[in-house]
Image (tube, grey):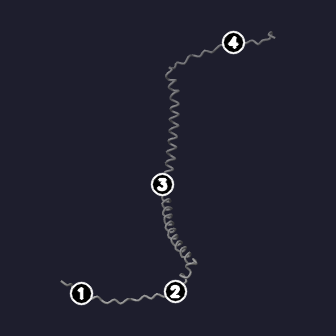
Amino acid sequence: MQAIQPTVTPLRPVKTPPRVTSGRSSNRRQRSYPHQTLAAETGVKLAVNIVLSVCAISAVIQLWPHYQAVQEKLQEIQAEVNLTQERVDKSRSDFNRYFDPSLAKTVMQEQSNRVDPQQRPVILQESETPEVEESTPQP
């Protein structure tokens, strides 16, 4: 089995001329690229944030008059609600008074000229008071 073996020719390494570079410049390139990329990325982020901020500020400025108009309408509506609430409270108290069985006689007397037969009439008369004469002070 070992009789048939392919012949392997040894490979000779190709010699290339050595590069003449100082260790400093290659390190500087490797170090400067990450900083430049980081600076570019930060600059792009900053630019995008500035553009978004300008857009947001302009939107707020455009919406401000609409906000003020809505606030004025809201105040007007609140004032109307307060007036209506007062009217509702008055109507509710009148309703409760008119439909209260204990006050039925009183309400009927107010609404008509009839008087309860068991009620005694009260007549007010002016009392005549004698005029007081001026008295002279005595020494």
Residues at marks 3 and 1, CA–CA distance in whole angstroms: 85 Å
For the N terminus, which image quadrant?
top right
- Give the residue displayed 60% in from the left and 15% down from the top: 15
Rendered view: 27 above or below 115 = above
| Pointers 2 and 3 in contact (C-beta within 8 Å) | no
Rendered view: 111 above or below 8 = below
> Circle 3 sits on which residue?
61
Q: Amino acid at mark 3?
A: Ile
Residues at marks 2 and 4, CA–CA distance in whole angstroms: 142 Å
Of labels 4 and 3, the one closer to you: 3
Q: How many marks?
A: 4
> Circle 1 sits on which residue?
135
**For the residue labelled by badge 1, is the local secondary structure a helix, a strand or a loop?**
loop
Give the mark nearer the N terminus: 2 vs 3.
3
- Give the residue displayed 80% in from the left and 11% down from the top: 4
Foreground: 121 or 15? 121
Q: Amino acid at mark 1?
A: Ser
> Circle 4 sits on which residue?
10
The residue at the far right in this view is: 1
For the C terminus, which image quadrant?
bottom left
Residues at marks 4 and 3, CA–CA distance in whole angstroms: 80 Å
Foreground: 22 or 118? 118
Left or right? Give the position of 9 relative to 27: right
| Pointers 3 and 1 in contact (C-beta within 8 Å) | no
Query: Where residue 123 appears, x then y in whole percent?
Result: 45, 88
| Pointers 1 and 4 in contact (C-beta within 8 Å) | no
> Circle 2 sits on which residue?
119
Give the mark nearer the N terminus: 4 vs 3.
4
Query: Where residue 62 appears, x then y in whole percent?
Result: 49, 56
- Give the residue displayed 50% in from the left and 23% down from the top: 25
